[in-house]
Amino acid sequence: MLNKNTVLSLLATLMLFAGLPSWAAETPPVGGAAPGFRLQDQNGEWHDLADYRGRWLAVYFYPKDDTPGCTTEACNFRDNIYAFKAIGAEVVGISVDNVDSHREFSEKYKLPFVILADETGATADAYGVLRDWQLMKIASRQSFLVDPDGNIAKHYAEVDPDTHTQDVLADLEAMMAEPEQGP
């Protein structure tokens, strides 16, 4: 019997032969409004981007629950969650997996933050990170910092799951330390 990682590797190989993926829309520009979303979390509760207004938000997109890179990234956010809370920032993970998959992933790794189920891929598409291979859709591993006004403050197009959390924390601390620009 094939394990989950073997199946995913076979699918990835198959996708190479099935042709190039259909890429998502362009990513929203830094300084522009973050695309809104209304998605269910791992507990079936609904979350809206507007729920985070007034706070800094790290939104990280990832390909698949319980795969090596995605687990590393999620566990690094988990292990640093108190540092995010200490500076008043929230963390939200998003993938195209369903609520049940997110629940299992969250419980297995004791994730203390929201992971949202974007089953249709509409949110990933709005952020320009959806990859559609016809056989399978995933969100590419990219992240966005959303400022308290709901605008994109930073886009991370290249993410290393091992170091990304530290990069996000350092950038958030630097941005929060910057004085407000007046009119």
Image (cartoon, rainbow, N blue to C red):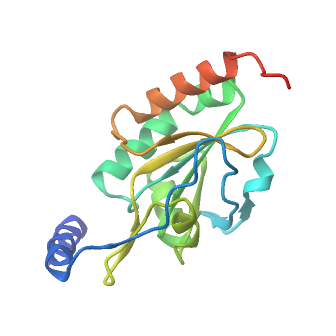
Q: Position of residue 116 (x, y in %)?
A: 59, 61
The residue lying toward the viewer, choosing from 40 and 125, is 125
Q: Is residue 103 above or below residue 173?
A: below
Q: Is residue 53 above or below residue 19?
A: above
Q: Position of residue 104 (x, y in %)?
A: 48, 63
Q: Residue at x 45, y 45 (%)?
A: 74
Residue lying at the far right of the rendered structure: 183
- In the rendered structure, the answer to whether residue 1 lies left or right of residue 34 reads left
Q: Residue at x 66, y 52 (%)?
A: 34
Q: Position of residue 78 (x, y in %)?
A: 51, 39
Residue lying at the far front of the rendered structure: 183
The residue lying toward the viewer, choosing from 56 and 74, is 56
Q: How many marks?
A: 0
Q: Position of residue 120 (x, y in %)?
A: 54, 78
The image quadrant that residue 1 belongs to is bottom left
- In the rendered structure, the answer to whether residue 78 lies left or right of residue 162 reads right
The residue lying toward the viewer, choosing from 125 and 166, is 125
